[in-house]
Image (cartoon, rainbow, N blue to C red):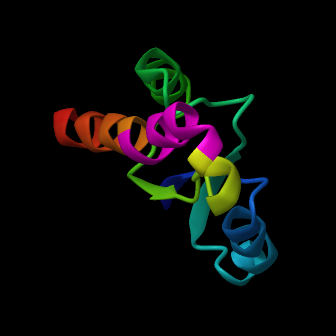
Amino acid sequence: MSSFLVTGSEGQLGNCFQLVAKEFPQFKLFFKNHSELDIIKPEMLSNFFKKNPFDGIINCAAYTDVEKAEIELKKAEEINLQGVQNLIDFATDK
C-alpha cells in the first residue's frame, strides 16, 4: 500500500483531500496540520518520516490570504517559498 504525507490538512485544499480520502482505501494518507508538521522546519519532516515512512508528499500547505500576505510578506514567503523548497529538498534526498 502506498502512503502519502498530506501537509496543510486544515486548509481549504487539505480539507477537500480529507473529504475524498475514504474513496481511495488503497492509499494510506497522513494528514498533518501546521502545528503537527511545520514545513518551515526540515527536522520536523525528517522526524516524522523516521516514525512514519511515506512514498510521496501532497502539499496543501500555503499562505493564501493575498491581502494579508502583503503585510506579512516574510511569513508568506517562508511558507510558500522556503516551505516548498524544504519539501523538494527532502523528497530529492529520499
* Depth order, front residue of 67/53: 67
Residue 20 placement: quadrant: bottom right
- Answer whether residue 56 is magenta in the image: no
Please identify the residue farthest to the front as the structure is shown.
71
| Residue under the point 58% across and 59% down | 60
Where residue 82 sits: x, y (%)? 37, 35
Please identify the residue farthest to the left as the structure is shown.
92
Horizontal arrangement in the rendering, residue 60 relative to residue 77 (left or right): right
Where residue 69 sits: x, y (%)? 61, 49
Horizontal arrangement in the rendering, residue 32 relative to residue 94 (left or right): right
**Residue 60 in the image: above or below residue 24:** above
Range drawn in magenta: 71-81
Please identify the residue farthest to the bottom as the structure is shown.
23
Horizontal arrangement in the rendering, residue 8 relative to residue 73 (left or right): right
Q: In which quarter of the image is the C terminus?
A: top left
**Residue 46 in the image: above or below residue 85:** above
* Depth order, front residue of 47/75: 75
Query: Can the viewer see residue 34 in this picture?
Result: yes
| Residue under the point 58% across and 73% down | 26
Query: Can the viewer see residue 7 in this picture?
Result: no
Horizontal arrangement in the rendering, residue 62 relative to residue 78 (left or right): right
Label total for image: 0
- Answer whether residue 80 is magenta in the image: yes
Tell me which secondary structure the magenta stretch mostly adopts. Answer: helix
| Residue under the point 57% across and 53% down | 62
